[in-house]
Amino acid sequence: MGRAVYQRLSSHGIKTLGELREVPSLLNCYGKTGRDLYKRVCGTDNEAVIPYHDRRGIGMSRNFKAIQNRDEIFRRVTILARYLSHTIVKLGIAPLTFYFKICYEFGYSSKISVTHHRLFNERFFIDLALETIRKLDKYPNYAIHYIAMNASNFMTPNNRKTYSLLEYEKDKKMASLNAGLLKIRDKYGVDIVRYGSEKMRVDYL
């Protein structure tokens, strides 16, 4: 429910969905959107149930107070990539395309999408994230306040690709290590195993 609808309902003393159900006329002025919202309030949904569909993408982002120090930016990139990697491994998906974006102060931004036919593993993804963010950093004199990364183009029965043979054996070993890390992190938390580069500088304590 959007802010405008919420404010309109509040002005009429509507506080619960039960109360809204008794006065459908309050939503009539919103046309089809209002009618659809009222159907949801009443638990009415005639849309077909889709039992399964291919996942299109998964990502994470962080917005924070603008930071000039690039070492701190890279530390945060490592942490974000580790968390996203954990989710990807946990879901058992195999992305081939990766999107990265950084936003600077003063409204500047830089983004890119890259595709690698590699067997996904945490070490590969963190290295890729750090390398890509360094290349994306076109305004080194500006502070950064936003980092985003996304994975898509998953290997599925309907989307089969061939992995690069040059890195396959190494990636296979790292993927096996990820499987072990997944069990440990699921039991003790994602931060139980971290990288030395994630250690926070005294400046930011």
Image (tube, grey):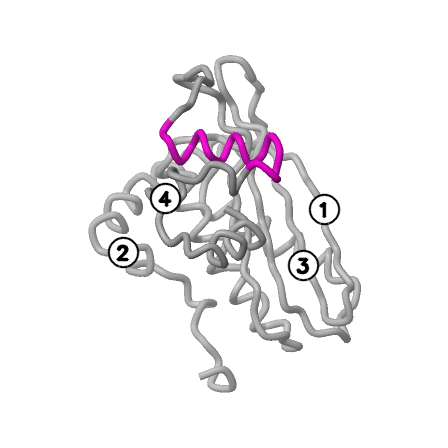
Which label's residue is closer to the chain start, 1 or 4? Answer: 4
Q: Position of residue 87 (x, y in %)?
A: 40, 43
* Comparing labels 1 and 4, the label whose residue is closer to the camera: 4
Q: Extreme bottom residue here? A: 203
Q: Amino acid at mark 1?
A: Ile
Q: Amino acid at mark 4?
A: Leu
What residue appears at the point 31 percent right and 39 percent down from the top-left corner? 179
Q: SS for tag 4?
A: helix
- Residue identifier under label 2: 189
For residue 147: magenta? no
Tell me, yes or no, whether the two marked residues, 1 and 2, touch with CB atoms within 8 Å.
no
Which label's residue is closer to the chain start, 2 or 3? Answer: 3
| Label 1 – label 3 distance at C-alpha | 10 Å
Which label's residue is closer to the chain start, 2 or 4? Answer: 4
Q: Extreme left residue here? A: 187
- Residue identifier under label 4: 17
Res 142 seen here: yes
